């Protein structure tokens, strides 16, 4: 079947893996993933969050490797103040500068972070990025000299709120020389390495990117990422107003920020793809003009054979107008040939809406309460095929009903109008994703305008299948990446597949007609049956597949009371879970809002993870721990308000101190003498809060300005990695597949101070 072959080929292209990793014996001037993986294994021996001995070990490893490569490293040791999140802390950025033939002038900067979360060894996030920088530096030195300097920046405190990047931009003199930025990140352990984010005016950068082989990138991801609540170091670097490209990979997201983000689970081919892009773009920027030429934005997508297709964003509106004109021509042609064209338009539109709704509802039914193993690779592929076929079956069924009343050309008008309307709207509002709807609409309208009456004509047959080819190779990679990887097949991704497949199929009316012929109902029932079997099989495979589940337990006590608690996030404490067993059967749920009740877990426990979210807590024996100390240095009345300067002391080994002020608004704040500026914060909070990461043994200073006459209350929660030995408590061992997540298990000591 031609349609099946087209979509099978498109799915195969969407699911293609990364390239083969090059061995350590590869030529010195090329990037070798095997050489880079040696760095990954060295850095990712153990977890290394800020403030720990292993964090210092990884810092020293990077410094030693830079020296071994013949460049002189620098360490920027400073207090960083976050500008995107309510975070601050002590950071130690590591950097080196490779001179070009015109040294000391504008430079290319490559960046990755060397810190990690407390739960795992951080092999992918972001030892992989650090290894890409080290291997790229080696390869650049082995090749012909570049014209411009290259800065290699290994930031600290990215996981703590982009702190190292903020400090580099705010304080380091090299920041003024940066004219192009390449940042390397990860949100999984393998898959395609994707260039997913750029700054404004990216046409020049994308044209350079197009020269590289095996690049995965699309302006769709760049557009969508602007609306996501996510940040990387590039968010801080963009304040320099310089061109930048962000690379990452996301397959294996179930291991992201867990104990299985280790060297054993990372895909070396992914490192090869990311590293080849790093080396290629470093040479392109390093040999080209700096500063780069000012350009508009680009629309781009990678396709088989052609590679990265790039055109200016200014083309979006003319293409949308072309789609609109072709759609009008299709309406006129159909109205002349079919007297019931208006009925066909209405019925075709209704069929599109009904099929899309049924496909989404069926997907919701199959994915709701689906076993976690559905997200495993084999199960998720089977489930995706099943959900897609169910949606396609509903499309054939609706097509059969519509075709009882009108001809195929008339029935195609409704979906065509919808797609053209979306193309026009996207070209004006979100041009970066306009190609997703504009090109399929143009192809579908052409079929109706030109017609395919000459069935024996080769040109007619090619035209008939043009919309399917265009749609498949534009949209199947998006469905695959969104449904199976980014959103997850067991959640919104599965619903998206179930709904979008019939929405896409509605545009392919001539192809539905060619496939079904006079057996429309038989085709619909057959496709639905196969889809049902595949969806059921996907759930069954998921129930048998081993799939990681996340866990985190905190031991928390207050220095102001006699109680102590074992705490976990409410979302982790489902019935029968390891987390629920670890904190005890008598544990109670605590909501962020509400008054404390004697004997119940206190509400400050909802903030032990740095936010405000429901937790489940059970009583635990109290052990001796050192609480954070607060000493008032100065307390003065000024015209701006009451200014209180404090010294906060912590026990050795403290990872972070959560600070929270109640009782009065904070008018201004400073940490270690540096002003806290909340103007760029992503999320505003009703009360002032800040987390200080990696405090020195000597502590840190905090200055708060509040209204004169107010009595602020400062709450502090000091975090340390790991759990203490609790008398009479035996923590059940984690079974295989239950993974420490995010900060990992931790100990928290709380104190409340009123001024």
Image (cartoon, grey):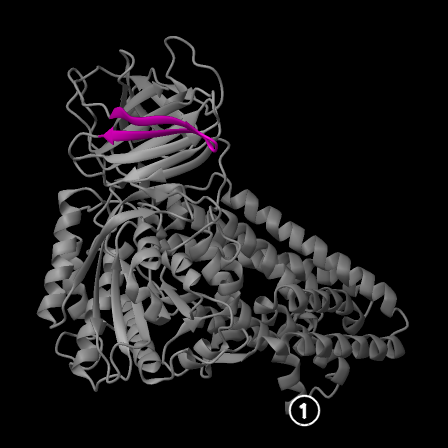
Q: Which residues are magenta?
A: 629-649
Q: Is residue 363 left or right of residue 671?
A: right
In front of the other: 97 or 259: 97
Q: Is residue 729 left or right of residue 482?
A: left
In front of the other: 638 or 54: 638
Inspect the magenta stretch and tell me whether residue 644 lies in it.
Answer: yes
Q: Position of residue 608 (x, y in %)?
A: 34, 29
* Residue 190 in the image: above or below residue 439: above
Query: Residue 613: in sight, yes or no?
Result: no
Identify the residue shown where x is 50% and y is 74%. 301
Inspect the magenta stretch and tell me whether residue 32 lies in it.
Answer: no
Residue at the disc numbered 1 = 457
Report the predominant secondary structure element of the magenta stretch.
Answer: strand
Q: Position of residue 632 (x, y in %)?
A: 29, 25
Q: Position of residue 129 (x, y in %)?
A: 27, 62
Q: Is residue 293 left or right of residue 324?
A: left
In front of the other: 246 or 419: 246
Identify the residue shown where x is 36% and y is 42%. 87
Q: Residues within 10 Å of mark 1 (few under 14, many from 20)?
A: few
Q: Position of residue 123 (x, y in %)?
A: 23, 55
Circle count: 1
Viewport quadrant of the N terminus: bottom right
In front of the other: 604 or 450: 604
* Residue 459 in the image: above or below residue 473: below
* Residue 331 in the image: above or below residue 528: below
Dot 1 falls on a residue whose secondary structure is loop
Query: Residue 559: in sight, yes or no?
Result: yes
Identify the residue shown where x is 34% and y is 77%. 281
- Residue that lies at the very extreme toward the right in this rendered image: 339
Identify the residue shown where x is 71% and y is 81%. 446
- Residue that lies at the very extreme toward the top in this rendered image: 598
Q: Is residue 256 left or right of residue 481?
A: left
């Amino acid at each position: 079947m031609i349609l099946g072959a087209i979509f099978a080929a498109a799915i195969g292209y969407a699911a293609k893996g990364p390239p083969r990793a090059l061995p350590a014996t590869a030529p010195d001037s090329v990037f070798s993933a095997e050489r880079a993986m040696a760095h990954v294994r060295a850095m990712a021996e153990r977890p290394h969050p800020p403030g720990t001995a292993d964090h210092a070990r990884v810092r020293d490893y990077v410094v030693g490797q830079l020296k071994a490569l013949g460049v002189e490293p620098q360490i920027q040791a400073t207090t960083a103040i976050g500008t995107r999140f309510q975070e601050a802390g002590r950071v130690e950025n590591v950097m080196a500068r490779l001179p070009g033939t015109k040294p000391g002038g504008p430079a290319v900067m490559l960046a990755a972070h060397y810190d990690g979360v407390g739960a795992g060894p951080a092999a992918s996030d972001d030892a992989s990025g650090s290894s890409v920088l080290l291997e790229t530096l080696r390869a650049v030195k082995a090749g012909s000299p570049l014209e411009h300097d290259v800065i290699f920046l290994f930031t600290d405190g990215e996981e703590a709120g982009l702190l190292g990047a903020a400090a580099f931009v705010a304080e380091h003199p090299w920041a003024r020389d940066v004219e192009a930025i390449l940042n390397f990140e990860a949100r999984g352990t393998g898959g395609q390495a994707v260039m997913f984010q750029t700054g404004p005016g990216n046409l020049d950068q994308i044209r350079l990117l197009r020269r590289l082989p095996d690049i995965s990138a699309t302006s769709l991801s760049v557009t969508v990422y602007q609306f996501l609540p996510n940040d990387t170091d590039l968010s801080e670097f963009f304040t320099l107003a310089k061109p930048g490209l962000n690379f990452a990979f996301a397959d294996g997201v179930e291991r992201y920020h867990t104990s299985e983000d280790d060297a054993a689970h990372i895909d070396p081919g992914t490192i090869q793809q990311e590293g080849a892009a790093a080396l290629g773009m470093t040479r392109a920027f390093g040999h080209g003009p700096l500063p780069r030429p000012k350009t508009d934005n680009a629309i781009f997508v990678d396709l088989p054979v052609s590679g990265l297709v790039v055109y200016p964003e200014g083309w979006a509106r003319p293409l949308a107008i072309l789609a609109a004109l072709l759609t009008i021509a299709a309406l006129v042609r159909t109205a002349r040939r079919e007297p019931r064209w208006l009925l066909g338009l209405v019925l075709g539109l209704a069929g599109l809406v009904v099929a899309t709704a049924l496909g989404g509802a069926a997907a919701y039914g199959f994915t709701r309460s689906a076993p976690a193993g559905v997200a495993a690779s084999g199960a998720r592929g089977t489930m995706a095929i099943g959900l897609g076929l169910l949606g396609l079956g509903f499309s054939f069924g609706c097509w059969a009903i519509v075709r009882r009343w009108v001809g195929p050309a008339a029935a195609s008008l409704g979906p065509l109008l919808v797609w053209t309307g979306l193309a026009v709207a996207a070209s004006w509002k979100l041009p970066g994703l306009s190609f997703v709807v504009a090109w399929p609409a143009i192809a579908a309208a052409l079929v109706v305008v030109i017609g395919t009456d000459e069935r024996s004509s080769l040109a007619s047959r090619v035209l008939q299948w043009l919309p399917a080819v265009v749609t498949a190779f534009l949209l199947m990679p998006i469905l695959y990446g969104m449904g199976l990887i980014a959103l997850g097949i067991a959640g919104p991704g599965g619903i998206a597949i179930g709904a979008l497949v019939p929405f896409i199929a509605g545009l392919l009316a001539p192809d539905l007609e060619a496939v079904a012929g006079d057996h429309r109902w038989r085709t619909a029932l057959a496709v639905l049956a196969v889809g049902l079997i595949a969806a059921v099989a996907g759930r069954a495979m998921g129930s048998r597949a081993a799939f990681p589940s996340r866990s985190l337990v905190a031991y928390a006590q207050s220095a102001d009371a006699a109680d102590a608690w074992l705490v976990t996030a409410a979302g982790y404490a489902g019935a029968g879970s390891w987390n629920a067993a670890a904190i005890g059967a008598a544990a109670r749920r605590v909501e962020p809002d509400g008054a404390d009740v004697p004997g119940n877990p206190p509400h400050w426990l909802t903030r032990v993870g740095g936010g405000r979210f429901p937790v489940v807590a059970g009583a635990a024996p109290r052990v001796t721990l050192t609480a954070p100390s607060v000493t008032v240095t100065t307390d003065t009345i000024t015209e701006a308000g009451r200014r209180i300067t404090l010294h906060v002391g912590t026990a050795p080994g403290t990872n972070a101190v959560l600070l929270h002020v109640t009782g009065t608004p904070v008018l201004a704040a400073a940490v270690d003498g540096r002003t806290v500026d909340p103007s760029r914060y992503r999320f505003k909070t009703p009360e002032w809060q800040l987390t200080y990461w990696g405090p020195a043994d000597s502590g840190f200073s905090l200055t708060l300005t509040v209204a004169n006459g107010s009595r602020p209350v400062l709450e502090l929660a000091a975090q340390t990695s790991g759990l203490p030995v609790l008398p009479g408590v035996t923590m059940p061992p984690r079974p295989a597949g239950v993974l420490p997540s995010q900060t990992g298990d931790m100990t928290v000591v709380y104190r409340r101070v009123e001024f």
